[in-house]
Image (cartoon, rainbow, N blue to C red):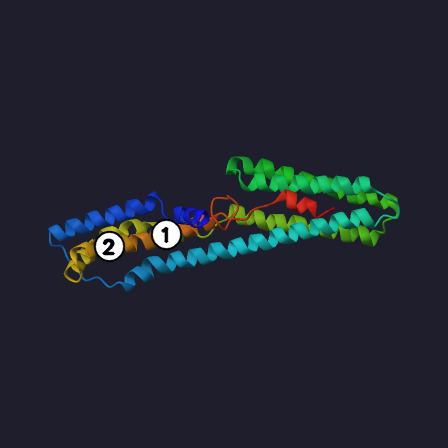
Amino acid sequence: MRQILRSINLIVNYKTLIVASMALTITTLCHIYDLRANFPLNLIGIAVVFPIVFSINSAYQRRENALQQLSTMKAQGISLYFAIRDWPENDHAHHAHLVKCLLEDILNALKSFFLSDASEALIKEKTIYQKFSEISKIINQLREHNVSGSEITRLHAYLSSMIQSFDNMKNIYYYRTPVTLRAYSKVFIYSFPIIYGPYFAFAFDEYAPGLAYVVPILYSFILVSLDNIQEHLENPYDLIGEDDIKIDVEAYISTFE
């Protein structure tokens, strides 16, 4: 029950109250001054609902891509750790331990990077690349411990795949769904109560007096809720929305044992 209430709280907020209040006020004024018009309802679907749903789908696809890249990055990290631990002829647990610590540092830095603002992101991004560089140096040290050149190349391939996945996740963080499309949707959502006030006043003749006020509230609730869903999906790393990506560092490191 608590989870359901939290989900509802994320999609129904102060913006819902603002748009609903505007819709009620404009509808009442149009009714008082007899400003009525039978506007086509399909205009709402074309001008507002379709762009919002398109943005939601785009944001969801970005989240799914980010999940896939995170999974690839973690899987390549595990492969790298096992290889460094098991491939050398002698026991080199020290190198494996260092790589494990570096992988833990990378994931912690990754969490911090995704929760930072633009002014701090570049500094934290450099920290992550420095950790990758330290892993690369450890791989090169294995040449001195009878690890063949082909195996060293494969280890670098694991590391390269991790870096590529990080770059893909980073691009998702920096570049969002089209800004102009989101701005367009918001303009229509907030202007909707004004534009359709005469239509809601026209509906007074078709509904009971109390129910006539439910219609603008319902439309406002639907449109703002869709906009809130898109906004929470927009950044899959900020840990605000229900569907955001959670990086569990402890669970990941525990798989190395």
Inter-mark Cα distance, 1 to 2: 16 Å
The residue closer to the viewer here, 242 or 142, is: 242
Residue 58: mark: none
User: Given this view, does label 1 or label 2 mark the residue nearer the observer?
Assistant: 2
Give neighbour class at mark 1: few <14, some 14-19, many 20+ (Cα, 10 Å): some
Picture coordinates of residue 189, whole percent (x, y): 31, 51
Residue pointed to by mark 2: 214
Q: Residue at x 78, y 45 (%)?
A: 139
Q: Amino acid at mark 1?
A: Ser
Q: Secondary structure at mark 1?
A: helix
- Residue at left offset 85%, top offset 48%: 88
The quarter holding residue 137 reads top right
Disc on res. 225: 1
Whether residue 244 is visible: yes
Residue 231 in the figure: left or right of residue 246? left
Q: Is residue 180 visible?
A: no
> What SS does tag 2 mark?
helix
Check whether the beta carbons of the residues at disc 1 and disc 2 lie within 8 A of each other.
no
Compared to residue 110, the image places residue 209 above or below, namely below
Q: Residue furthest front?
A: 1
Q: Residue 138, position in %: x, y? A: 78, 42
Q: Is residue 21 left or right of residue 175?
A: left
Number of numbered discs present? 2
Sequence-wise, which precedes: disc 1 or disc 2? 2
Relative to the observer, which residue lies in front, 242 or 104? Answer: 242
Question: Which amino acid, mark 2?
Answer: Val
In this rendering, is residue 43 above or below 111?
Answer: below
